[in-house]
Image (cartoon, rainbow, N blue to C red):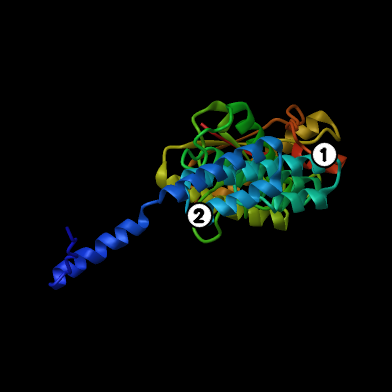
Amino acid sequence: MSTIALQPTTPAQRLILALLIAASSLLPTPALSADCERLATQAEQAANAGQLDALLRLARALNEQACNREQIHKTQVQAADLAVQQAQTRLAAGDLDAAEQQLQRAPMTTWLTEVSAGDIAAHRKAWGDAARHYNQAYTLMRDPAQTPQRPDDQYIDQVRTLAGQALVLSDDLDTVISRSSGLGSGIYAEVSSARSHRVIPAPVRFETDSAALTQQGREQAERLAVFLRQRAAKDPEAGIMLVGHADERGDADDNQRLSEQRAETLRQYLLSQGVTLHLQASGRGEQQPFVLPAGSPPLTNEERWQLDRRVELRFE
């Protein structure tokens, strides 16, 4: 019995046939599925063996074969994590260039790659870059869409402190406050209800042994005012305590008085810039030096004193 091939005769029939052919082309063939399974197995083996070159090659192959997106993403994450591990090994050996080159091989950006980039920048004393990377890591690790399995709270707090440390040493709020909108990002994006997340440092400088703002201090205080005006629009009842600190040098009573005066100077400046939030000022003198987080590179005495001379915003 012969088979008669039916030919479409109307435009509608021809359209339906074209759609069916197009749809069938999207379905994976048995051979393609088998190839994907083989590549996925090899990728898992390469990841377990710490073979970054092979893992990167397999990630590209999975993508070229149009395999399952979840498998492609998993392999890319594994490659990024492995690049971070190898970069950290080189960083621990003191080879910053090799660490940076290794990290650049990561096929995607994750919170781990950003932490590692921050570590490298911090060891270079490139504090602006370190602040940018640590703050981006903090944002990514708290975003469920980007990090379904977030690290534990202790590690998040560590990264948050590293971000704050780099921010103070960078002397610049650019990494956390938008120049155009005044909106905050990173540790400035949102003040959590958790007690440890209600305090953020501000890189505002003062003249030596004085409560007068430096030029840099005025610039950063102005940026801070823009941020706080934005926050007042969302939460006009929020209260903020500005807390001044001092380093260990000099007389303790003088340092206490100076820390109070500096916090009050900043309060007055913010009010003059139209901040309507309830602002208070206090000082801690040299009683609460900055606690260096785990993962901090060695700091000079001047860097440590700069951290100790910080001003903090405590949201109440």
Residue 279 position within the rendered picture, expressed as x and y whole percent measured from the top left: 53, 39
| Number of residues whose C-alpha sits closer than 10 Å to that of mark 2, classed few (under 14), some (14–19) or many (20 or more) | some
Looking at the image, how many numbered discs can be counted on the residues? 2
Q: Give amino acid for label 1.
A: Ala
What residue does disc 2 label?
65
Residue 216 position within the rendered picture, expressed as x and y whole percent measured from the top left: 71, 56
Q: Earlier in the sequence, mark 1 or mark 2?
A: 2
The N terminus is located in which quarter?
A: bottom left
Badge number at residue 221? none
Res 5 quadrant in image: bottom left
Gap in angstroms between the C-alphas marked 1 and 2: 38 Å
Q: Of all residues shown, which one is farthest toward the left?
A: 10
Residue 79 position within the rendered picture, expressed as x and y whole percent measured from the top left: 64, 45
| x 65%, y 46%: residue | 55
Question: Is 259 in front, or is 7?
Answer: 7
| x 79%, y 29%: residue | 253
Q: Give amino acid for label 2.
A: Gln
Residue 159 position within the rendered picture, expressed as x and y whole percent measured from the top left: 65, 36
- Residue 14 versus residue 212 in the image, above or below: below
Question: Is 250 in front, or is 124?
Answer: 124
Question: Is 193 in front, or is 142?
Answer: 142
Q: Is residue 187 left or right of residue 309?
A: left
Task: Assign a secondary structure to mark 2.
Answer: loop
Q: Is residue 293 visible?
A: yes
Task: Assign a secondary structure to mark 1.
Answer: helix
Res 24 quadrant in image: bottom left
Badge number at residue 92? 1
Q: Of all residues shown, which one is farthest toward the front?
A: 1
Res 286 quadrant in image: top right
